[in-house]
Image (cartoon, rainbow, N blue to C red):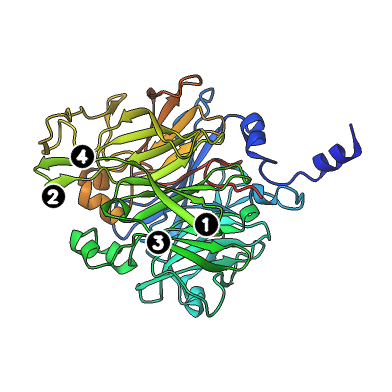
């Protein structure tokens, strides 16, 4: 073995050297770490460890969880203390999940060294964020410099203020906000993804925290309480270089942002919830960035529902590690779409699958579009699946897609009251290695409706070694 190869092996840090390395050497996931809000007000959320090893006696079971000490936190998304962006630093270990909370603005640091014995190592109380005037915390990403960056949607009073808080990667204490002082901040914020090699970061917009907490109202969209822009930052300079208003009704409420995993390529995608579309953002070669509508999913005319037209509500998108497929969950229609994005300028719908939702035959909704057949509800192993497909997590080899069904407790209560009261599930979809076609695994269901007498709503899922939404390559 050459000296350089020996040095590379010895210096191996967290994660994988490249997306190709993750696909080849990542192996099959054995556990899922899942953020799980409690269904009941005034109760405690949990971070659960689910066994997804088909050879295990506890396959599909919650084998361990840590209960959080405070009430009404609303755990939502999660990130790592370090990831593949620090692959060359052998002193770093992926050992802690960072759990920002929406409602409480609290941050939990969960020790995951032993997946079967999760424990809380540190808590950042919301009072420690008051000097920074940030609240309603969402996306967490580890950075190559050892810090942890979390998107923040509000100010101390729950009004709209877009920024990011940096945590020290060793002490987990807040250090400062990320955006350069005395430069423009986005009015709204939500998700973000960065590509250091391209010196770029993109953020999206949800809405005003106080409005979100009060439940979804169409008039709030009309009154400008929700966003329709993406913001492009110069990564090294920490400042906005361009804001793009996503056009028309298709651009309303942009949520998840995903870049291609290959750090040499400049293609990003954002899914819009109310707009139920996917936009493609790319470098036009002239120092600015263009945005085009890559795919749009039509609403359905209905009766017996809150509105006369039901949008699909695209609430999550995820890209396979080989950058071939993009998956989009349509929470209200109960559909997952799979697009071949081998050519980012030519989306091709390759497969779709139905999982319950709000349009099936056991709801009170009547479909008025003649060319839209009413689907059946989804049952797995005798369990009726409430809600629709929401958060997605894909195996590193692209063969298994995990699906949870909760969005946000207050919105669950509005759109899926049975889900919000009973608790949720995690399902698995198998992906054909050759055709990419999706099939629902009828033998797999994770039940969170009764965990030691309490019911929970599964949201984001993580693998111990990194996954398709946690790791970024330099």
- Judging by the rendered image, the residue that carries numbered circle 3 is 102
Q: Which badge, 4 or 1, is on the more N-terminal residue?
A: 1
Q: Are marks 1 and 2 in contact (CB under 8 Å)?
A: no
286 is higher (above) or lower (below) than 310:
below
Cα separation, mark 3 vs mark 2, equals 27 Å
Quarter-wise, where is residue 105 in the image? bottom left
Secondary structure under the numbered disc 2 in the rendered image: loop
Q: Nearer the viewer, mark 3 or mark 1?
A: 1
| Callout 3 secondary element | loop
Query: How far apart, in angstroms, are the residues tagged by discs 3 and 1?
Result: 12 Å
* Upstream in sequence: badge 1 or badge 2: 1
Q: In the rendered image, which residue does mark 2 sit on?
A: 307
**Residue 7 screen position, x and y as percent:** 85, 43
Q: Looking at the picture, how far across and down is residue 9, in whole percent? A: 81, 39
Q: Earlier in the sequence, mark 3 or mark 1?
A: 3
Q: Which residue is mark 4?
A: 358
Q: Residue 335, position in %: x, y?
A: 30, 35
Q: Is residue 458 visible?
A: no
Crowd class of label 2 (few under 14; some 14 to 19; many from 20; radius 10 Å): few
Whether residue 218 is situated above or below residue 348 in the rendered picture: below
472 versus 27 height, above or below: below
Q: Are marks 3 and 1 in contact (CB under 8 Å)?
A: no
Tell me which label, 4 or 2, sits earlier in the chain.
Answer: 2
- Front residue of this view, candidates 110 and 179: 179
Q: CA distance from mark 4 to mark 2?
A: 12 Å
Q: Which residue is mark 1?
A: 140
Helix or strand or loop: what does disc 4 sit on? loop
* SS at mark 1 in the image: strand
Describe residue 114's horizontal placement relative to residue 271 as left or right: right
Q: Earlier in the sequence, mark 3 or mark 4?
A: 3
**Label 4: how many residues lie within 10 Å, few (<14), some (14-19) or many (20+)?**
many
């Amino acid at each position: 073995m050459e000296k350089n190869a020996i040095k590379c092996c010895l210096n191996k840090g967290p994660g994988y050297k490249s997306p190709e390395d993750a696909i080849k050497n990542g192996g099959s996931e054995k556990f899922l770490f899942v953020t799980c809000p409690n269904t009941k007000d005034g109760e405690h959320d949990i971070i659960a460890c689910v066994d997804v090893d088909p050879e295990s006696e506890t396959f599909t079971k919650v084998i361990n969880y840590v209960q959080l000490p405070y009430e009404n936190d609303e755990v939502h998304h999660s990130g790592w203390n370090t990831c593949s962006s620090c692959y060359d630093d052998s002193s770093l270990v992926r050992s802690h999940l960072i759990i920002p909370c929406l409602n409480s603005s609290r941050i939990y640091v969960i020790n995951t060294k032993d997946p079967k014995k999760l424990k809380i190592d540190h808590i950042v109380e919301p009072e420690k964020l008051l000097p920074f005037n940030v609240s309603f915390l969402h996306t967490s990403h580890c950075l190559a410099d050892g810090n942890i960056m979390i998107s923040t949607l509000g100010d101390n009073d729950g009004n709209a203020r877009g920024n990011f808080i940096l945590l020290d990667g060793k002490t987990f204490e807040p250090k400062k906000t990320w955006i350069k002082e005395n430069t423009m901040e986005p009015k709204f914020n939500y998700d973000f993804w960065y590509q250091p090699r391209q010196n770029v970061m993109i953020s999206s917009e949800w809405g005003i925290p106080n409005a979100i907490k009060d439940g979804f109202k169409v008039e709030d969209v009309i009154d400008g309480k929700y966003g329709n822009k993406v913001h492009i930052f110069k990564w090294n300079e920490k400042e906005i270089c361009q804001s793009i208003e996503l056009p028309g009704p298709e651009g309303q409420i942009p949520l998840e942002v995903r870049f291609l995993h290959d750090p040499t390529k400049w293609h990003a995608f954002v899914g819009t919830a109310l707009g139920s579309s996917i936009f493609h953002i790319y470098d036009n070669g002239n120092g600015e960035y263009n945005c085009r509508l890559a795919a749009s999913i039509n609403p359905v005319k209905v009766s017996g529902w809150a509105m006369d037209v039901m949008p699909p509500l695209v609430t999550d998108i995820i890209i396979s590690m080989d950058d071939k497929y993009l998956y989009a969950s349509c929470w209200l229609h109960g559909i997952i779409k799979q697009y071949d994005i081998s050519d980012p300028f030519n989306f091709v719908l390759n497969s779709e699958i139905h999982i319950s939702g709000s349009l099936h035959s056991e709801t009170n909704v009547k479909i008025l579009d003649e060319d839209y057949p009413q689907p059946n509800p989804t049952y797995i192993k005798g369990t009726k699946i409430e809600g629709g497909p929401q958060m997605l997590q894909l195996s590193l080899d692209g063969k298994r897609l995990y699906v949870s069904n909760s969005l946000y407790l207050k919105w669950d209560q509005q759109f899926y009251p049975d889900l919000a009261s009973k608790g949720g599930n995690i399902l698995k979809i198998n992906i054909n290695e050759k055709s990419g076609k999706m099939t629902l695994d009828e033998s797999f269901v994770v039940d969170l409706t009764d965990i030691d007498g309490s019911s929970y709503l599964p949201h984001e899922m993580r693998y111990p070694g990194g996954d398709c939404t946690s790791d970024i390559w330099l």
